[in-house]
Amino acid sequence: MMTLNAQTLATLRQRLRWLGAIPPIYVVLIALFVWIWILNPNFSQSTVFLSFLRRATPLLILAAGQLFVIVSGGFDLSVGSLITLTVLGSAVMLDNDPSRTWWVISVMYLIGIGVGLFNAFVVNVLRVSSFIGTLGMLLALKGLALYWSSGAPAGYLPDNFRIFGRGVVEDVPLLGRLPYAVIVLIVFATIAIFIYHGTSLGKLIKTVGDNPQAARLSGVRVSWVRTIAFVTSSVSAVTAGILLGGFAGVSTNVGDGYELEAISAVVLGGAVLLGGQGSVPNAIAGALTLRALFTLLNLLGLSAPVRFVVQGIIIIGAAAYAAYSMRRSSK
């Protein structure tokens, strides 16, 4: 009898260890989904949930890109303005002509890569902190977007451009209608997960973020790694901009606040703001949690400014926790 009890206790301990290994963000996410479902039972329907996921996709993609920069030890505050530039610039270049869609998208990705390279140049060569450098880029890109569009929404995004944000694939088994945005999310997330978790580049990003000086002494090309991180973030911003243009249309403030939401999402996913630690699936889960939280706040009838309070608390709490962890590890 005692042997059986001992075996039972051992099995229970193993299960508890397995549960303890689950990142807390997934527990919070499930709890939020259950709460939303209680307030809105239709949320469990595939069409309603996929509609929610479609609206959340730009932030999910942006968080995956932002993770690369944060884990490498930096910040990218320029992504919100790059989203705005993508939408406004695309509308101006398209000039209501659907035949221009593919080359305009190509140009926007080239601009995004250029922004990522310039951010990396400012950080690596000019030795400006990523926070200050990308803050300056945020202002410059927003000014460029407004100048390009003459300070007001101009042009029209044709249907073959907007299909990525608002189009759906019909008659999908079990799901019914699958938004193109969700397909884009799956492709982008798969590539990001493979690069970050399945290649040596992901390890180098963590190494650079954890201790750039030690990484440099061990032969790691720190500037090259940081450049890849910034370019990845910018590419994610252009992708998010294309999707937002698809279902939100042309607006001069379409990307406002997304840089803070992306950082908040990555922090919620357990990434350390000072670099060296993070996970792409957890960052995406953090973004989904943030969107679920905003949805819940709306269902509870709370005002939009509460979002800023929540994001501020998340960032302050994460910074405090990171500082506390560093103090403990240094003892």
Image (tube, rainbow, N blue to C red):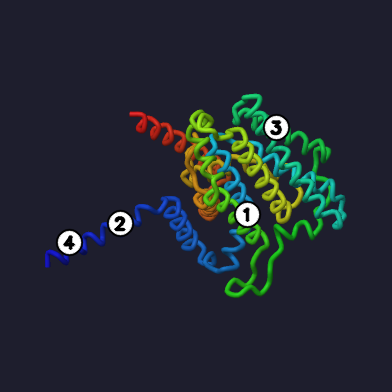
Q: Are marks 2 and 3 in contact (CB under 8 Å)?
A: no
**CB of mark 2 within 8 Å of CB of mark 4?**
no
How many discs appear? Answer: 4
Badge 1 is on which residue?
A: 188
Residue placed under numbered mark 3 in the picture:
139
Point out the tag, 3 or 4, that comes first from the N-terminus: 4
Q: From mark 2 to mark 1, how far is it between C-alphas?
A: 34 Å
Mark 3–mark 4 Cα distance, whole angstroms, equals 64 Å
**Residue 242 shows up from this direction:** yes
- Tell which tag, 1 or 3, sits nearer the viewer: 1
Mark 2 and mark 1 lie on one chain; the one further toward the N terminus is 2
Name above or below for residue 187 compared with residue 309. Answer: below
User: Mark 2 is on which residue type?
Assistant: Leu
- Name the residue tied to disc 4: 6
Amino acid marked by disc 1: Phe
* Distance from Cα at disc 2 to Cα at disc 4: 15 Å
